[in-house]
Every structure is written in C-alpha cells, then in structure tokens.
Amino acid sequence: MSKKNKKQGDTFKDFLKELEAKAVTSSKPIDEIEEIQYFLIVCEGERTEPAYFNYFKKFLHKKQLYTFEVSGEGDNTINIVKKAIALNDERMENILMPNFDEVWAIYDKDDFPSARYHEAISLAKQKGIESGHSNQSFELWYVLHFQYLQSALHRSDYIKILSRELGFKYTKNDTKVVQFLFDNCDANKAIQWAKKLEEMHVGTNPAYACPHTRVYELVERLRKYFKLDE
C-alpha cells in the first residue's frame, strides 16, 4: 500500500473511532414508554356516571377512553353488561381500530332483585367484562371522597351527605359536582376507603355487601395514564 493510501486509511479509521466515541458519550437513557391501554365504559345515560367518566378524557390520551351511554335500560342491570359485550365484540371485528384492553359495565344494585344483580356480575365475569357495580349506588363513590362510610345506608342518604359536603344541592349528572371532586378532593383517599370496604366484604355475596363499590378499581387504573404534566 502506498503511503498516500495508508494515510487515507488511517484517517478513515480515526473518523470511525470519533463517531463511535460521540455515539457513546451522547447516548442518553431512554425512558420506557408504557403502552397505551384502551378503555370502554358502558353506563346508564340518565345517571351520574357519564358526567364523571367523560371528565377523565381531559387527562388521557386522545381516543384512549370511550364511553357509551345506554338509555332506557334502568330496569335491567343485565342489559348494561350485554351492551358492553356487544360493543366489545363489534370493536374486535373492526380491523381499523385497536381492541379494547378493558371493557367496564357500570351499574348499581339499587332496589333490583338480588338474583338479577348477581346474574349481571356473573355474566360479566363469564364474558371477560369488568363489572363496576355499586351497592347501593354509584354515589357511594362520591361520598368516599369526603368520608369513610361503612354503614348500610339507603342511597337517598348518600344524596343528603353529598349536598351537605358540597355546600350545594346534589343532582345527578351535574358536571359542577365532578369539577368539585377533581379540584377539591383526594381521589387516592377515596380509593383507600373503597378498598377497606372491599376487604370488609370479602366472601360476602355482592348483593348483600353494602356499602360497596368496585368503581375505585377502574378509577385507579385510569389515573395511571393521567397526563398531568402536559
């Protein structure tokens, strides 16, 4: 090899070493990006739940959360679960959209027969649907933002408690209530108290577990994806 070619070869090797050195010194640890999970929540349109869960969309990635409001199904908790199953099946057949990672049916015990309530929970479990049931009603979840309630009160008492704590009359599907909860209450404390109720009712038939709500588990999972820093 001529001196000229040898010099060019050495220069090229030096150039490669320089690139490798820069690659090593400039490399930065890359934060692991958690895969986005897609949620579907099916609930009754005339109830409190739609206003509450639609508010979550402000803190989540676009199209990460879908809510579906069922109208005229209040006489049958099972219909909420069946609608959730149908919507999940429909989404799985759509090749243009990602499948839902979690599908939730949100409904209350209210005064429905215990057998009907239990049947809805069993059907959800059988079909892979998350059951966000509350006994007696969804408003229990709101109450837990203010106090730990373990007495088996009627759901009408939840309304009285909420009106007193809020400082204004509580009405269903009121976005002002949702805003108050997000701005002034500690959801983590509500989750903690809901878990205490869960532990208290271990082994109890859900129809007789009162007060009790599984809504906390959905809220806890959604909050993992909150974009509070953006």
Image (cartoon, rainbow, N blue to C red):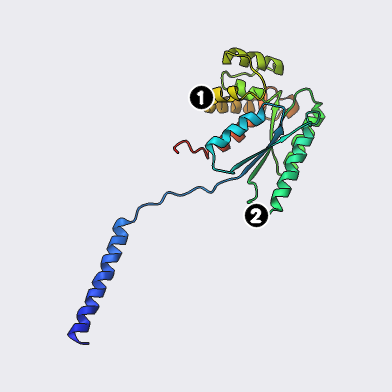
Name the amino acid type tagged 2.
Leu
Q: Which image quadrant for residue 204?
A: top right
Q: In which quarter of the image is residue 163?
A: top right
Q: How crowded is mark 2: few (under 14 residues within 10 Å), some or many (20 or more)?
A: few
- Number of residue marks: 2
Which quadrant would the C terminus be assigned to in this image?
top left
Residue at (20, 87) in percent of width and height: 2
Quick check: 62 left or right of 93?
Answer: left
**Mark identifier at residue 96:** 2
Percent across and percent down for residue 56 are: 57, 34
Query: Looking at the rendering, in which quadrant would you find the N terminus?
Result: bottom left
Q: Quadrant of residue 57?
A: top right
Q: x, y (%) of residue 169?
A: 63, 14
Q: Which of marks 2 and 1 is in front?
A: 2
Q: In this view, does 61 lie above or below 26?
A: above
- Please state the horizontal and vertical placement of residue 85, each as a whole percent of the image: 74, 43
Q: Which of 93 and 155 is in front in this view?
A: 93
Residue at the image position 53 percent from the left and 28 percent from the top = 188
Residue appearing at x 56%, y 43% in the figure: 62
Q: Which of 204 and 61 is in front in this view?
A: 61
Secondary structure state at the residue bearing disc 1: helix
- For the point 63% across and 23% down, which residue is it? 174
Residue beneath label 1, please? Answer: 183
User: How many neighbours does mark 1 have within 10 angstroms: few (below 14), some (14-19), or many (20 or more)?
Assistant: few
Rendered location of residue 200, percent (x, y): 64, 25
Considering every residue shown, the one lying at the far bottom of the view is 1
Label 2: state its secondary structure.
Answer: loop
CA gap between label 2 and label 1 equals 37 Å
Left or right, 56 with respect to 95, comes to left
User: Would you say the residues marked 2 and 1 are in contact, meaning their CB atoms lie under 8 Å apart?
Assistant: no
